[in-house]
């Protein structure tokens, strides 16, 4: 298959913005790693007008996919984990082109520093957890138990990923098999959700209490990334937070997360005068000394 794809990736490799090329082959009919394709051609570029460019190919009875992605998208996939296969591609794919050992260095970083990106991954998962719980409780109190059940399920998945990150590991597609070994109490909650004979409303009530307890015990770690990032400036507008190179990965969960951290006393609000005397701008800040002491900076 490599010789069929060679003209495609060689053309890309000759372009100065191309950082690296990896080929991943399907192994023993395990299709989820390659998204059902026989081969994946991953091309990482420094920048592009289209951040993710995809093409499908066919050769006899083989089907192939080419992804041309920017370095920023690759980091997003690694940090957020919304394309879990990419870690496997980086670890196990065959490097066909590597400008200045970009892929070799990235692979080494992922191998030698399993905590690489842990803070931002933890922060993102924690912010998603906060939103799911808040939405789920609102649905629960309105009597929409099935919708609340869905939110509890998602909340437990975020808790599961957080527990794996706490151990310095990468959450896998089969995250619950990891959690069963390293955080049996969270696995037990998932079993309660699925198999408990309690009525649905009672089951949800108990699970919300348990999840909130676990949230409280993880807030310190969950807040670390955003608090350390906010040390870069004295005060922030919400737009500045949204467009920060790393905080933008929190996406639609950022504002809910900020309000949660304000409520918990981690983030402060700074009113600033506006042109209209009857209204003020709402800026955000953190206590530099508190953050530095909390996280031994």
Image (cartoon, grey):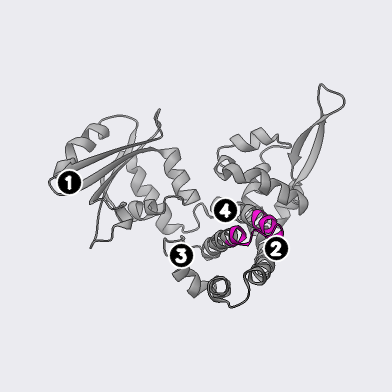
Choose between 13 and 263: the one closer to the eye.
263
The residue indicated by pointer 2 is 216
For the view shown, which residue lies furthest in the top direction?
275
Query: Mark 2 and mark 4 in contact (Cβ < 8 Å)?
Result: no
For the view shown, which residue lies furthest in the bottom direction?
197
The residue indicated by pointer 4 is 119
Q: Identify the mark nearer the N-term, 4 or 2.
A: 4
Circle 2 packing at 10 Å, graded few (<14), some (14-19), many (20+), is: few
Q: Identify the mark nearer the N-term, 1 or 3.
A: 1
In percent of width and height, residue 253 lies at: 61, 46
Q: Is residue 86 left or right of residue 128?
A: left
Circle 1 packing at 10 Å, graded few (<14), some (14-19), many (20+), is: some
Which disc number belongs to residue 292? none
Q: Main secondary structure of the magenta part?
A: helix
For the view shown, which residue lies furthest in the left direction?
60
- C-alpha span from label 4 to label 1: 37 Å
The residue indicated by pointer 3 is 175
Check if residue 250 falls in the magenta segment: no
Query: Mark 4 and mark 3 in contact (Cβ < 8 Å)?
Result: no
Check if residue 145 falls in the magenta segment: yes
Q: Identify the mark nearer the N-term, 4 or 1.
A: 1
The residue indicated by pointer 1 is 2
Q: Circle 3 sits in a helix, a strand or a loop, which is it?
A: helix
Q: Circle 2 sits in a helix, a strand or a loop, which is it?
A: helix
Q: Identify the mark nearer the N-term, 3 or 4.
A: 4
- C-alpha span from label 4 to label 2: 17 Å
Q: Is residue 260 left or right of residue 198?
A: right
Q: Identify the mark nearer the N-term, 3 or 2.
A: 3
- Find the magenta span and give its range: 134-149
- C-alpha span from label 1 to label 2: 51 Å
In percent of width and height, residue 235 lies at: 73, 36
Residue that appears at 62% across and 59% down: 148
């Amino acid at each position: 298959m490599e010789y069929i794809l060679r003209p495609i990736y060689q053309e890309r490799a000759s372009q100065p913005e191309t950082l690296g090329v990896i080929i991943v082959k399907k192994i023993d009919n395990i299709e989820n790693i390659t998204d059902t394709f026989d081969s994946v051609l991953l091309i990482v570029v420094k920048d592009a007008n289209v951040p993710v460019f995809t093409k499908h190919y066919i050769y006899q009875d083989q089907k192939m996919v080419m992804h041309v992605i920017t370095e920023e998208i690759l980091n997003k996939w690694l940090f957020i984990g919304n394309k879990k296969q990419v870690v496997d591609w980086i670890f196990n794919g065959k490097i066909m082109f590597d400008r200045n050992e970009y892929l070799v260095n990235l692979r080494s970083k992922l191998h030698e520093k399993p905590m690489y990106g842990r803070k931002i991954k933890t922060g993102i998962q924690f912010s998603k957890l906060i939103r799911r719980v808040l939405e789920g409780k609102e649905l629960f109190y309105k009597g929409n138990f099935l919708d609340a059940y869905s939110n509890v399920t998602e909340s437990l998945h975020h808790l599961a990923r957080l527990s794996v990150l706490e151990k310095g590991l990468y959450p896998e597609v089969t995250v619950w098999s990891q959690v069963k070994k390293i955080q049996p109490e969270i696995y037990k909650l998932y079993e309660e959700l699925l198999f408990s004979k309690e009525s649905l409303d009672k089951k949800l009530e108990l699970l919300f209490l348990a999840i909130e307890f676990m949230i409280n015990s993880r807030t310190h770690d969950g807040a670390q990334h955003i608090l350390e990032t906010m040390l870069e400036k004295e005060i922030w507008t919400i737009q500045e937070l949204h467009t920060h190179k790393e905080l933008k990965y929190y996406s639609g969960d950022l504002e809910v997360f900020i309000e949660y951290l304000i409520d918990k006393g981690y983030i402060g609000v700074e009113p600033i005068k506006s042109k209209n005397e009857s209204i003020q701008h709402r800026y955000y800040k953190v206590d530099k000394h508190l953050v530095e002491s909390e996280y031994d900076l």
